[in-house]
Amino acid sequence: VQLQASGGGLVRAGASLRLSCVASGRTFSRYVMGWFRQAPGKEREFVATISPSGGSTYYVDSVKGRFTISRDNAKSTMYLQMNSLKPEDTAVYYCAAGLYSGSIYYTRMAEYDYWGQGTQVTVSS
């Protein structure tokens, strides 16, 4: 699976962005999908994950109520709608795909098999 993330940018606090992750090469609907982020000087951290069907989602506490993960299996695309952005959301955002093996979503990096190249999100105060 090849993953291409896009949609990042420079915005002010309180603004919104929508990230996209387009997949190619394998059957998209077989994969659990997720978003991670890495801020400068910090380790990559889990942000959100979605089950293969899109029916189940899970978020890190810091983004609950502000971010929404979704997917369109017909378009092999995953999204991350980010609202009420804060400066602490500044990071490179990565999308990832993990072949479904029984768990409806994954929160650990080791559970993912494929990674996109990342897209920069910068939130100014």
Image: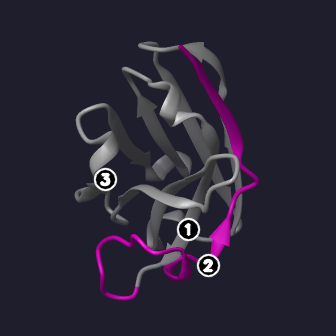
Dividing the picture into quadrants, the one containing residue 52 is bottom left
Q: Are marks 1 and 3 in contact (CB under 8 Å)?
A: no
What's the distance in space between the residues labelled 1 and 3, CA to CA? 16 Å
Image quarter hosting the N terminus: bottom right
Q: Nearer the viewer, residue 27 or 23?
A: 23
Q: Nearer the viewer, residue 77 or 56?
A: 56
Residue placed farthest to the front in the image? 41
What's the distance in space between the residues labelled 1 and 2, CA to CA? 6 Å
Residue bearing mark 2: 113
Q: Report the side of 11 relative to 29 (left or right).
A: right
Q: Was residue 111 drawn as part of the magenta stretch in this picture?
A: yes
Precedes in sequence: disc 3 or disc 2: 3
Q: Of helix, strand and loop, which one carries label 3?
A: strand
Label 1 is placed on what type of residue?
A: Ala
Label 3 is placed on what type of residue?
A: Tyr
Can residue 6 be spotted in the picture? yes
Residue that appears at 38% across and 23% down: 83
Label 2 is placed on what type of residue?
A: Asp
Q: Colour mode?
A: one colour
Q: Position of residue 117 (x, y in %)?
A: 76, 54
| The magenta segment | 101-125
Q: Of helix, strand and loop, which one carries label 2?
A: loop
Q: Are marks 1 and 2 in contact (CB under 8 Å)?
A: yes
Picture layout, residue 35 above or below residue 88 = below
Q: Of helix, strand and loop, which one carries label 1?
A: strand
Precedes in sequence: disc 1 or disc 2: 1
Picture layout, residue 16 above or below residue 46 = above
Residue bearing mark 3: 59
Q: Report the side of 24 relative to 99 (left or right).
A: right
Residue bearing mark 1: 97
Look at discs 3 and 2 and give the one toward the viewer. Answer: 3
Q: Position of residue 50 (x, y in %)?
A: 36, 59
